[in-house]
Amino acid sequence: MKPTEPAVLVVPSSMALADVPPLCERLRELYAAGAGEVVCDVGGLVRADLAAVEAVARLRLTARRAGGHLSIRNAGPGLVALLHLAGLAEVL
């Protein structure tokens, strides 16, 4: 990872609530390693559901607590709609 390039965190194709804490831990590790910005790639998600929304919300909170910036890329239309409904559209 070059200092000018954001780190990338890839969300697995299938999300369950139990997958959220390990994702947050990986995000904390990226910030601890010096990443100032992390891009969360959700393009592989098979289904947009509340577990995916929970993951985005918790990752956003983790990023804020670490003093970093998080953005989401490759979100499908279903996830985009759910994030808008949840008030999390600004991470897109």
Image: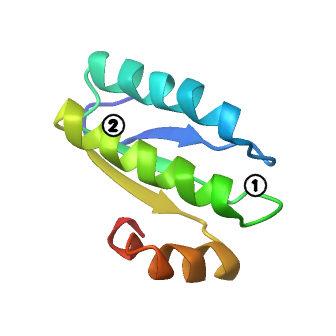
Q: Decide which of tag 1 and tag 2 comes sooner along the chain.
A: 1
User: Looking at the image, how many numbered discs can be counted on the residues?
Assistant: 2
* Residue ID at (67%, 33%): 19
Res 62 quadrant in image:
top left
* Depicted 29 relative to depicted 48: above or below: above
On residue 9, the disc is none
Res 45 quadrant in image:
bottom right
How far apart are the two marked residues, 1 and 2, measured between alpha carbons? 21 Å
* Residue ID at (63%, 72%): 79
Front-most of residues 53 and 76: 53
Residue 86 percent location from the top left of the image: 45, 73
* Residue ID at (32%, 72%): 90
Residue position marked by numbered label 2 in the rendering: 62
Q: Quadrant of the C terminus?
A: bottom left
Tag in front: 1 or 2: 2
Residue position marked by numbered label 1 in the rendering: 44
Q: Horizontal placement of 20 versus 66: left or right? A: right
